[in-house]
Structure formats: structure tokens, C-alpha cells
Image: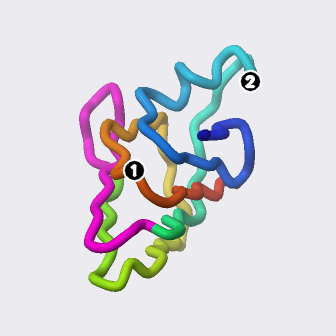
Amino acid sequence: MSNLNLNPIEVTGSVTGYKAQTQAAQGALRSLEIQRIRWVNPGVSASLSIGDPISGTILEMMKSNSSGEDVEIEYIPTRLWQDFAIDTFPGSGTLLIFTR
């Protein structure tokens, strides 16, 4: 089960919109300053797309290799996401989104 109120944010399934799903728990929402994202145990040759639910812009595209090793992307400097969505989660692994 996903837990969008932690740091790192833990995603294990589709997310229609981070802000919409966390507004009740967090009250006034802010943009996210992303330091790093890591896909743990993604499975073999799987892919994942993180997008902006308002503009449709693809924020990040991730793909695992043929041995299913973890995939990690670190942002230096950090990236600012206004919101994010994951339409189709491939069914394996956990996506960790580290924020500041």
C-alpha cells in the first residue's frame, strides 16, 4: 500500500495526483523539492512513467534492466514538482521519492 505522507514518499501503485490524495492529511499543500527517486525491486525490464496530472508533462521515465536491479536517479540541484501522478504502476517494487 502506498504511503504518500512519509519522507521518502512510498508508492506501490497508481497515483492519480499526489496533491489530491494528500490534501486531507496535509492541509495546505506545497510543491515538492525532489532530491532523489529510487525504484526498489522493479522486476525485469519494467518501465514506469511519472507525470504532471495538470499539464501532462512527463517528469521522469524509469526503466529497469534485464536483471531487475534497483533504479535510482539523484537530482543535483534538486527538482521542483508542482504535483505528480503515476497512471500505471507495473505491479512490482516500491518507488521511493525523497523530498526536502
Provide residue 10's location: percent of width, then percent of height. Answer: 62, 49
Residue beneath the point at 35% across and 85% down: 67
Q: Amino acid at mark 2?
A: Gln
Tag shown at residue 53: none
Q: Nearer the viewer, mark 1 or mark 2?
A: 1
Secondary structure under tag 1 reads: loop
Image-based side of 44 in relation to 30, left or right? left
Q: Which is nearer the N-term, disc 1 or disc 2?
A: 2
Q: Which residue is mark 1?
A: 91
Residue beneath the point at 47% across and 34% down: 83
Provide residue 38's location: percent of width, then percent of height. Answer: 53, 67
Q: Which residues are magenta?
A: 42-58
Residue beneath the point at 27% across and 82% down: 66
Image-based side of 44 in relation to 80, left or right? left
> Residue 45 versus residue 24: which sits nearer the camera?
45
Provide residue 95's location: percent of width, then percent of height. Answer: 52, 56
Above or below, 79 relative to 11: below
Q: Which residue is mark 2?
A: 26
Above or below, 32 relative to 83: below
Q: Which of the image's four quarters has the N terminus?
A: top right
Q: Quadrant of residue 21?
A: top right
Name the magenta segment's main secondary structure.
loop
Q: Say if the magenta span includes residue 79.
A: no
Q: Which of the image's four quarters has the C terminus?
A: bottom right
